[in-house]
Amino acid sequence: MASHAAETLIGAAVLAVAAGFLYYASTAAGISAGSGQYTLTAKFRSVEGLDVGSDVRLAGVKIGTLTGVSLDQETYRAVTRMAVNDTVQIPDDSDVKVATDGLLGGAFLEITAGGSPFMLEDGDEILLTQGSVSLINLLMKFVGNDSSGTSNSE
């Protein structure tokens, strides 16, 4: 009978630790029950490198999380949805771009605040966007340029 009680206590401890890990993971990823956040959208030509759960930053400070990415079937642009902390008010003339942490770092959304006195509200769209830049495409353009100053066509 004592072994059953010990097994029950160990099982309860395992469940408590699992619940703690789940809580930590949800808070670290910025997932919440929806309170304390508002949703913004933005459309990009390319969101290469971004994943759901990526950071949304303003002045280098995490203010939210990317909650969804989909394709607009009419414009063929990537539509992103982000949850932003409601303690942060963003001017409606702000812009957002896909940025990376260094050459090999992960991608995130970087918001640059504008100067408008009017703030974005829940469900609004950030209109000024800049998509991700492919490092391979940049290198190919650099290598492909003729740096000798002469033209190959005569």
Image (cartoon, rainbow, N blue to C red):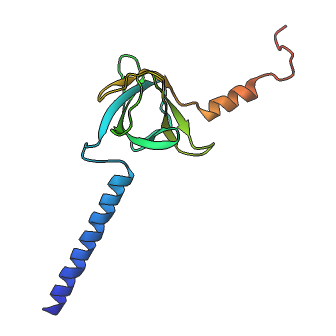
Residue nearer the viewer, 50 or 90: 90
In the picture, measured across the screen, residue 124 lies left or right of residue 10, that is: right
Q: How many marks?
A: 0
- Which residue is painted at 42% across and 23% down in the image? 77
Q: Position of residue 26 (x, y in %)?
A: 33, 53
- Which residue is painted at 73% across and 28% down in the image? 142
Name of the residue lying farthest toward the front: 117
Residue nearer the viewer, 80 or 49: 80
Name of the residue lying farthest toward the left: 1
Name of the residue lying farthest toward the bottom: 2
- Position of the N terminus, as image quadrant, is bottom left
In the picture, measured across the screen, residue 87 lies left or right of residue 99, that is: left
Q: Position of residue 42 (x, y in %)?
A: 40, 26
- Which residue is painted at 28% across and 48% down in the image? 32
Name of the residue lying farthest toward the top: 154
- Which residue is painted at 16% across and 86% down in the image? 5
In the picture, measured across the screen, residue 5 lies left or right of residue 118, that is: left
- Position of the C terminus, as image quadrant, is top right
Q: Position of residue 124 (x, y in %)?
A: 33, 25
Q: Is residue 23 above or below residue 151?
A: below
Q: Is residue 151 above or below residue 63?
A: above
